[in-house]
Image: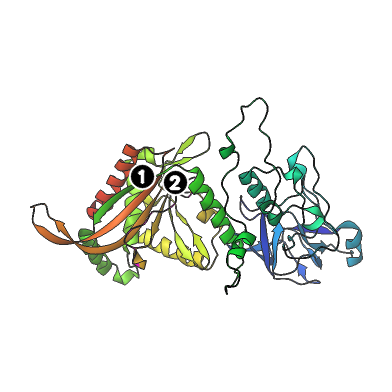
Amino acid sequence: MPIEVLMPALSPTMEEGTLAKWLVKEGDTVSSGDLIAEIETDKATMEFEAVDEGVVGKILVAEGAEGVKVNTLIAVLLEDGESADSIATGATAAPAAAGAEAAPAAVEAPASTPAAAPAPAAPAAADVSRIFASPLARRIAAQKGLDLSAIKGSGPKGRIIKVDVENATAAPKEAPKAVAAAPAAAAAAPSGPTADMVAKMYEGRAYEEVSLDGMRKTIAARLSEAKQTIPHFYLRRDIKLDALLKFRAQLNKQLEGRGVKLSVNDFIIKAVALALQSVPDANAVWAGDRVLKMKASDVAVAVAIEGGLFTPVLQDADMKSLSSLSTEMKDLAKRARDRKLAPHEYQGGAFAISNLGMFGIDNFDAIVNPPHAGILAVGSGVKKPVVGEDGELTVATVMSVTMSVDHRVIDGALGADLLKAIVENLENPMVMLA
């Protein structure tokens, strides 16, 4: 019996991916553990290992195929004595999951592709999980309050895709009769104009249309959801950096022989990690119907990459030395830019840091990345006139920070305590070595 090779789930949240590259060809012999393909998720390009051994009998999904659903059949391995002829009867399509299509066509047809015949309507079953619709189409329908059973799909086999729900005129689902009807203004979540509506605004103007890759789509969806569903509030402080800059220069001179050079960001990571230990009630995450208070300080740091960003997590940052944090952060940042991070390296954490100071930004407000309780937006250090302790005017290097906080987890006074602890650590850097 041919061995089916299915599209793997390379992270807990992965629903689909791009088959970036095949590392084998039909006729090759593979063993368990051999690398057979590179799979691109919304976050990284990862190598896919064979679980079984055999001969590659047929490759069913071509290189570069996008939107390949998890558990879609992508290739078939043959065991000893089997021939490619046996594939036709035993493994020509991916096994159907409950409520999903069993179709080898794992990629949605573009909205502009003409159909050879009218697309069949999606099943109007009461169980919406049996309706054939892409995950993105389901999310958009939920946001707009649309009933999927009333929408006609234009994708393969009548599957409902993004363009169908964006152009849908179906009425929102009725609220259960036992519940009082919501006000009309709140019947559906607000949504922006469709692609067609925007394009019409710019008819006659020259522009280039840039398709969104998986990472950009995920960033757009998650940050929109975060801003709409998380009750943000913001706390701002100025931090005098002169003592830190002097201390950093001394440490870097001592570390020259070890190949380590500390950055201001390394001190910020350490300061946040220690502050989370000093204010343990703020070291928490939102878990839907409860709050999870974390023991260790796992700090995520935003890293800009081409087309998006990663937030790799430095676990147990409160327990690590500045030189260890610096080395680990440089490694994570490099592999983030190469899209080589494993899922466990960018998932988790209770608090994040986003530093745009190196880009000349004085201050900004960042969006909380769920389920984190907060994020520290860091600006550049700028020389400014300040009033000294003796009341005289002097000049100091001042860095502006803004802490965005999820009010469901952290209240105003608690957030103020956390930010105060961060400021004290940075203005008195030697205490971070105690």
282 left or right of 288 in image: left
Q: Position of residue 200 (x, y in %)?
A: 62, 64
Give amino acid for label 2.
Ala
User: How busy is the neighbourhood of tag 2: few (under 14 within 10 Å), some, or many (20 plus)?
Assistant: many
Give amino acid for label 1.
Leu
Question: Can residue 41 be seen?
Answer: no
Q: Which residue is mark 1?
A: 276
Q: Is residue 151 above or below residue 247?
A: above
Closest to the observer, 243 or 331: 243
Q: Which residue is mark 2?
A: 350
Q: Is residue 329 above or below residue 272?
A: below
Tell me if residue 422 is in the magenta stretch.
no
Which of the labelled discs sits on residue 180, or is there none? none
Q: Position of residue 118 (x, y in %)?
A: 84, 57
Residue drawn at (71%, 45%) of the image: 170
User: How busy is the neighbourhood of tag 1: few (under 14 within 10 Å), some, or many (20 plus)?
Assistant: many
Task: Tell me which secondary structure the magenta stretch mostly adopts.
Answer: loop
For residue 128, which quarter of the picture?
A: top right
For residue 77, which quarter of the picture?
A: bottom right
**From the image, which quarter does the N terminus lie in?**
bottom right
Badge 1 or badge 2: first in the primary sequence = 1
Residue drawn at (75%, 48%) of the image: 151
| Mark 1 → mark 2, Cα distance in angstroms | 9 Å
Closest to the observer, 322 or 238: 238
Q: Position of residue 249 (x, y in %)?
A: 24, 66
Residue drawn at (92%, 65%) of the image: 85
Asked if the residue under mark 2 is in contact with the one under mark 1, i.e. CB atoms within 8 Å, the reply is yes
127 left or right of 252 in image: right
Q: Which residues are magenta?
A: 360-372
